[in-house]
């Protein structure tokens, strides 16, 4: 179950960040923030490869004791970061990919809204609903 | 019957009830207690706990009754607490009566306090829904002639609308007592009960809102009032704070029972209005409006950006960043609703779904007279009376849109809106003559301000600046080398007229002479703008489509000496000799018809020339486009080659 989902803008400030309500929400924010370095590292590790060849899904950025952090970058350098509970061992890579894809789709939908200027915080309620979808559904399919 | 001493539960201050109140309250109590058997399960346990011999009213019916009083929820809670029901846990007679008295106080605008009930108060008013009425009151005939009838059977919307004012003004009971003289018979009662049904549902959902009054819809309500019989003698107080769809919805109640969300239903006039707006942004109704265009348009509605963003999310079902016609109508309707104070729904209501909209409303046929579509779609569901009303308003609607292109001056337009009845015959005569002008809706000013909250006012505002600059100034920036500006400008009116179907063979008006001065006066300033920027030779004929088709060729004259104050048209040419003719009071008809023919032929010639020019332009631009494409391909190839190849 994804415990935290974040959308980071190109300039590395958060556009949208939501986590499962716990006492230590700040911890998730911190993890997302530190994961940005890893994202940059992975992106630059591709070297001077053509942008098209770079895959959007970055995979596991780094694991911690309780959580795993996955990353995804779009072509416009908008980053999606997802923090997943480590105890949910059966969460497969494909599911993470599909969750990111859904996230990307809902982000695109937000972009299509002419009243949304890129760079604003995402406040759309549909985005919240969509976030609930991928984060929840994607993992519920694996729930025991 | 019920005095303070009788209040065995010690509910505090003495409760003095007038005779009418006693009777009313006891009836109500009997009803609620009688319905205890059918009410939800709170009744019997409470009744068991209550003192023997004292009936209690079941919580369910009581709650329904209180809700029917149209008071906000907090007030009802306060009342329940104050009357002691919460304390003792059930609604005994005392609590019930105190509660009713408090309801009456609240409805009269007094604060909900125990002290309020000490003074003389009118009877509380309840709007009963049909089911409630059936359950509670059995057969209405038995209520005839009793005062109890008044609070319940006043289900006219007049009363309902008066309840809107309750919180704002203090009203005496006397108006509501008047129907006693003419008790409504049961069939009308039930006929009207459904009217309130929708309202009570509506109000209960929107009770916190105070929608802005819709003054323009008041004339709607007035014809309804007298028709509803005796109580209709009351002046319809309608704040009509509901948008027009409700008044139409009342008649359509039976047909529209599928969807309970009345505020989200688009009526015919609204639909036409939305479609007109769509066409003003995008001439092709089957195409879509791009996001930026729609954004500019909706921003004029002065709603906040987050709300507009949310509305967009709701209405753009396919999330493609563009609005098709049904999506646009849905968005527009949501904006209108929001401006009238309705909270935005969580999801798109079913009546605003694109599929529903497309199925429910076929695309309007603009080629034929708009009246045809009106007359077809309207009578299907509505009473003849409503038909008249809707026609009147739809004519107003219609008249508003082609107004810039009709022979209606600004003065006429104002008169139109202020006195629909007076203007009606005039409009009908004018509108019927200019169906083709519907195409010139394109020229409607887009820079309409939305600052009012009513469609009517918005439409009015839309017409107030009636002279938009001719819009399609599609000068190609890249092809400026072609000096298209120079080429376009003289032919803009020509092109516009080429786009609009020029009225070819117009039957000569019987009295063009007399009609001329009138039609001259009717020429709106828009015409003056169009020719003002163009060469004088072409626009004269091109203005023909704008104004009244007949007598135009005659009118297209250079007569600064005569009609300068009314319209500064630098018309020329053929009009020259004809102008002299027109100056005379009664030129002969034959001369005019020949002049007309000549003018028409000139117009045709000019149109053809304009067509040729445009065709040439088109081919040139196509050529340019091809070249640019090739350039682009070449550049892309270069880029590919130049891109650094990585060495891994």
Image (cartoon, coloured by chain):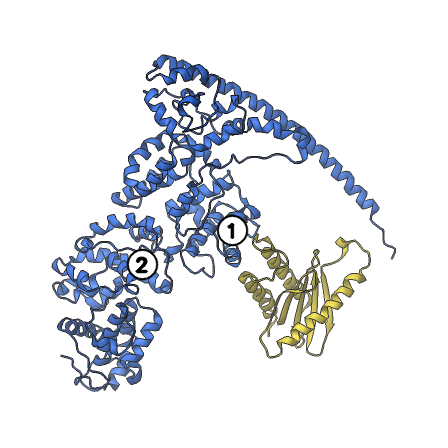
Residue at disc 2, secondary structure: helix
| Mark before the other along the chain sequence, 1 or 2 | 2
- In the rendered image, which quarter is residue B431 located in? top left
In this rendering, would A12 be left or right of B116? right
Residue hosting label 1: B299
The x, y position of residue B278, in whole percent, is 48, 43
Instruction: Left or right? Give the position of B152 relative to B588.
Output: left
Q: Position of residue B450 (x, y in %)?
A: 45, 49
Q: Mark 1: which secondary structure? A: helix
The image shows residue A142, relative to residue B594, as above or below, that is below
Q: Is residue A79 above or below residue B41?
A: above
Kindly identify which residue carries mark 2: B198
User: Which hue is chain B drawn in?
Assistant: blue
- The residue at the point 49 percent across, 25 percent down is B542
Q: Nearer the viewer, residue A39 or B489?
A: B489
Quadrant in which the N terminus of chain B appears:
bottom left
Q: Quadrant of residue B134?
A: bottom left
């Amino acid at each position: 179950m994804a415990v935290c989902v974040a959308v980071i803008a190109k300039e590395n400030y958060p556009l949208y960040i939501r986590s499962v309500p716990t006492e230590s929400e700040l911890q998730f924010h911190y993890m997302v923030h530190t994961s940005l370095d890893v994202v940059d590292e992975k992106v630059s590790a591709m070297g001077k490869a053509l942008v098209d060849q770079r895959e959007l899904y970055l995979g596991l950025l780094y694991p911690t004791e309780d959580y795993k952090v996955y990353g995804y970058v779009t072509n416009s350098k908008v980053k999606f970061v997802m923090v997943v509970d480590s105890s949910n061992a059966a969460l497969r890579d494909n599911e993470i990919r599909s969750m990111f894809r859904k996230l990307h789709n809902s982000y695109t939908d937000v972009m299509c809204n002419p009243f949304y200027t890129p760079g604003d915080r995402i406040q759309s309620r549909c985005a919240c609903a969509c976030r609930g979808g991928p984060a929840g559904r994607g993992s519920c399919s694996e729930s025991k | 019957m019920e005095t303070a001493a009788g209040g065995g539960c010690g509910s505090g201050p003495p409760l003095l009830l007038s005779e009418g109140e006693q009777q009313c309250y006891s009836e109500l109590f009997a009803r609620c207690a009688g319905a205890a058997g059918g009410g939800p399960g709170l009744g019997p346990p409470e009744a068991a706990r209550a003192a023997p011999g004292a009936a209690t009213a079941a919580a369910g019916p009581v709650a329904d009754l209180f809700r029917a009083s149209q008071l906000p929820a907090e007030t009802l809670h306060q009342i329940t607490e104050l009357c002691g029901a919460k304390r003792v846990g059930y609604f005994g007679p005392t609590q019930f009566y105190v509660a009713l008295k408090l309801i009456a106080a609240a409805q009269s605008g007094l604060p909900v306090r125990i002290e309020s009930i000490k003074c003389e108060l009118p009877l509380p008013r309840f709007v009963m829904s049909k089911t409630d009425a059936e359950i509670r009151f059995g057969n209405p005939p038995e209520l005839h002639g009793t005062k109890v009838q008044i609070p319940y059977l006043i289900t006219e919307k007049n009363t309902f609308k008066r309840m809107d004012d309750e919180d704002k003004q203090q009203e005496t009971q006397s108006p509501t007592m008047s129907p006693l003289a003419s008790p409504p018979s049961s069939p009308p009662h039930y006929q009207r009960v459904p009217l309130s049904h929708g309202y009570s549902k509506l109000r209960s959902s929107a009770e916190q809102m105070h929608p802005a009054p819709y003054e323009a819809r008041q004339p709607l309500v007035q014809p309804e009032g007298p028709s509803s019989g005796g109580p209709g003698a009351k002046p319809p107080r309608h704040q009509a704070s509901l948008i027009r769809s409700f008044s139409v919805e009342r008649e359509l109640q039976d047909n529209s029972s599928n969807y309970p969300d009345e505020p989200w239903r688009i009526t015919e006039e609204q639909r036409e209005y939305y479609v007109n707006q769509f066409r003003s942004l995008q001439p092709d109704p089957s195409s879509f409006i791009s996001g930026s265009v729609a954004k500019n348009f909706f921003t004029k509605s002065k709603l906040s950006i987050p709300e507009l963003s949310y509305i967009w999310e709701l209405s753009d079902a396919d999330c493609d960043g563009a609005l098709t016609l049904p999506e646009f109508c849905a968005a527009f309707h949501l904006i209108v609703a929001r401006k009238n104070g309705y909270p935005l729904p969580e999801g798109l209501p079913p009546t605003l779904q694109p599929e529903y909209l497309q199925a429910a409303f076929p695309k309007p046929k603009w080629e034929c007279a708009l009246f045809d579509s009106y007359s077809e779609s309207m009578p299907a569901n509505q009473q003849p009376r409503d038909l008249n009303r809707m026609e009147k308003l739809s004519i107003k609607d219609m008249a508003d849109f082609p107004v810039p292109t009709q022979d209606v001056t600004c003065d006429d337009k104002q008169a139109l809106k202020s006195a629909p009845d007076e203007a009606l015959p005039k409009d009908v005569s004018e509108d019927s003559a200019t169906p083709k002008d519907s195409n010139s809706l394109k020229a409607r000013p887009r820079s309409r301000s939305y600052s009012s909250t009513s469609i009517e006012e918005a439409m009015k505002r839309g017409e107030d600046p009636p002279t938009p600059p001719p819009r399609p100034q599609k000068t190609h920036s890249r092809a400026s080398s072609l000096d298209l500006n120079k080429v376009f400008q003289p032919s803009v009116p020509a092109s516009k007229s080429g786009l609009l179907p020029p009225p070819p063979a117009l039957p000569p008006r019987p009295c063009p002479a007399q009609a001329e001065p009138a039609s001259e006066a009717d020429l709106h300033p828009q015409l003056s703008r169009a020719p003002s920027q163009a060469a004088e030779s072409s626009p004269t004929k091109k203005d023909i489509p704008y104004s009244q088709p007949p007598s135009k060729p005659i009118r297209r004259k250079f007569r600064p000496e005569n009609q300068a104050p009314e319209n500064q048209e630098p018309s020329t040419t053929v009009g020259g000799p004809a102008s002299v003719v027109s100056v005379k009071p009664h030129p002969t008809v034959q001369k005019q018809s020949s002049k007309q023919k000549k003018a028409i032929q000139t117009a045709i010639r000019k149109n053809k020339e304009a067509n040729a020019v445009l065709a040439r332009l088109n081919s040139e631009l196509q050529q340019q486009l091809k070249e640019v494409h090739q350039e682009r391909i070449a550049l892309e190839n270069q880029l590919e080659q130049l891109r650094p190849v990585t060495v891994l």
